[in-house]
Image (spheres, rainbow, N blue to C red):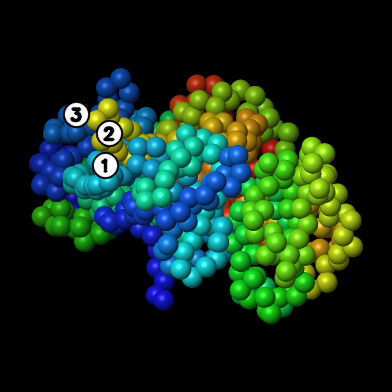
Amino acid sequence: MEKVLKKKALGAFLKKLASFGQVYGPVKTDTVRFEPVSHEKQLCLDEHAWFPVKEFLFPQKQVFFRFDGEKIITEDNVKKAVLFGLRKCDLNAFLINDKLFLEGEHKDLFYEQRRNNLLLVGLYCYHELDEFCFCSSMNLQDYHDIMLYDRGSYYQVKAGTPKGEFFIAHLKDTEAFVPPPTTCSLALPTQEIAHLFEHQAWKEGADSCTSCGHCTNLCPTCLCFTISDDVALDGKGERVAEWDSCQYKEFTEVAGGHVFREKRVDRFKHRIYHKIQYFRERFDMSMCTGCGRCIRGCPEKIHWIHLIGKMTQ
Amino acid sequence: MKKIKKLEGEGNHYSVPKLYAINSIKKQTEDEYLLRFDVPLEHEPAQFIQVSLLGHGEAPISICSFQDEYFEMSIRAVGNLTRKLCALKKGDKVGLRGPYGKGYPMESLKGNNVLVIGGGCGVAPMRSAIQYLERHRSDFGDVALYFGYRNPKEVLFAEDFNKWKKTFRVHVTVDKAPKSWKGEVGLITELLQKDSFDNTNKVAFVCGPPVMIKFVIALLKERGFNDDQIFLSHERMMKCATGMCGHCMIEGVYTCKDGPVFRYDGVKDLHG
C-alpha cells in the first residue's frame, strides 16, 4: 500500500526514522554532502550530493583488526544509520557493491554488518539534477527500503522492504502511483565497448588525465582498497584497509618494481572498462549508475561519455 | 591424516590470519629462503597463501610443495616484509591465511606428457606441481623440466635436481655464468629450441617474468601447441586475496581467485 507524507510532516517523519538510528541526509555546506540531520530545514533536496555514501559501507580508512604482540583483536562497533534522500543512482550502488563484498566465494563481514544496519530512504528524480547526470541510460533497478516521490504539496511514499514498511505504516493510504521515467539529456551511447579498446580517442582523455584519483574517490561503486599495518611505538598496531585507486601507477606494482598498468592510458581505460564492460560481463549489470560524479568532479573536466560518443558516432 | 582445509584466524573476518610457528627455515640462494610449516594442509599445486608479520604487512606467497604432512614456501627477500620474513628463525610465528586461488588442474591433466618451464623464482610454484607429478608418476607420460636463472648463484631448488633427474628429464640454464659453471648458458628459449618436442598429448606449465612468458609462448605456438595446452601462473599485486580489493585485476579477471594459474586460452587476449 502506498502512503501520503505531507511536506509539513517531514520533520515528524525524520524523527520517526531517527528511532532506527542517526539520520543522515544531503546538507549544503561548502558543497552538498551527507551529514547528520535532526531538522528537515537542514536538508538540501534539489542538488546532487558531491560525495557518494559508500563510506557508510566501507569507510575511507577502517581497521580490519588490532594486534598487540601475538594477540589479534577484532571489534565491531557498527552503529545503525538512516540514509535519507538517496537518489536512484546511489541506491543502485548498494546492489553493485553487494556483488563484490557479499555474494562471492568470500564475503566481508564488516561490510555485511554495516549494510544490515542501514535504512535506505530514497527520493525519486523526475529529471536530471544537473548536466552530468546520465542515469536514464543505465538501466537502473528499483531498490530501497522506503522511496519518496515529490507530488507537489506532499510526498507519495512506498516501502520496498518490511524494514521500510514499519516506518510508513502509520501514514495515510493512497492510490498507487506510477512515476514517469527519469529523463536525462546526457546519455551513455552504449555499454558495449569491447570493440573500442584500441580506439585512438582514448588517448585524448588520457592526455588530459593527471591520475589524481578524483574519479575513483567520487564514484559510488569504486571501493578498491589497499591493506597495510599501522604500528605505534609501543608495538601495538592495527591492520587497516584504505581506499586505493586504479588510477595510481603503484596500484599494480609488484615486488621488483614491475608495473602492469604503467601507461596512463591503460589506467584511464581500466576504470571505464571495469565500470561498463568487465563488471557487466561477470554480473550482468553495469557497475556505473550514471551519477555523473566522476565527470562533475574531474579537475580536468574529462568527459568520458562524450569520448565514447565520439568513438561510436 | 585429517587435513586442514583453511588457515584462518578467529573473528570471522577474512583478513584475520592465524599465527603458525616456522618448523624450519633454510637459506636457498643469496636472496631466497625456504620456510616449512608442519601443517597438513589441503591445497592444489601452486595455490598461494597470504603470509604476514603483524606490524610489517602481508604478501601472497605460492606454496612450493605438495606433501601430506607439511607445506613449504620459498620467499625472495626483495621488500620490507620479505626481508623480515627471511630473517626469521625456527619457532618464530608468522600469520597465515589461505590457501587461495586456483592451482594446476592436475587431476584433469592425467595421461598427458608434461613440459614444465620456469624462470627464476617462478620455479617455486612449479615445484608444487612437480611434487604432485612425483607422487602420481604413473598417471603421466614424459615429464621434462626446463629451468632458467639469471646466474648460477640464483639457481633455486638445485638440491632437488638429482632426485628429479631419476624420473624426469631436467634441463637447467643460466643467462650468464663464470667459467666454473659446468651447465648450459643462454636463455631458456634457446634451451627449448634444442629439444625436438611437439605438442602430442602434451601440456606446458609456464611461470616466470613477463618477458620470458612472452617468448616461451611464441615458441610453444611454433611447435604446434594449442592455447588450451598451455597453463600460465600469473603474478600480480594482491592485497585481499578474495576478489574485492581490485589490485590483481587483469581486465575483468581476478588473479587471486580466477588464477593465479590460468589456461592460456582464457587469458591470452586480456590487456594489463
Side (left or right) of A122 relative to B194: left
Side (left or right) of B140 relative to B190: left
Q: Residues within 10 Å of mark 3 (few under 14, many from 20)?
A: some
Mark 2 and 3 residues: CB-CB less than 8 Å, in contact? no
Q: Position of residue A197 (x, y in %)?
A: 69, 42
Q: Position of residue A194 (x, y in %)?
A: 66, 48
- The amino acid marked with disc number 1 is Gly
Q: Which numbered tag is attached to residue A113?
A: none
Q: Earlier in the sequence, mark 3 or mark 1?
A: 3
Q: Chain of mark 1?
A: A
Mark 1 and 2 residues: CB-CB less than 8 Å, in contact? yes
> Which residue is disc 1 drawn over?
A69
Give the alpha-carbon distance from disc 1 to disc 2, as whole Å.
7 Å
From this view, report whether residue B42 is shown above or below residue A59: below
Q: Position of residue A147 (x, y in %)?
A: 27, 49
Residue sitting farthest toward the front:
B180
Q: How many marks?
A: 3
Q: Chain of mark 2?
A: A
> Which residue is disc 2 drawn over?
A235
Q: Which numbered tag is attached to residue A42?
A: 3
Q: Give the residue displayed 30% in from the left and 38% down from the top.
A: A238
Q: Earlier in the sequence, mark 2 or mark 3?
A: 3
Q: Name the mark nearer the viewer: 2 or 3.
A: 2
- The amino acid marked with disc number 3 is Gln
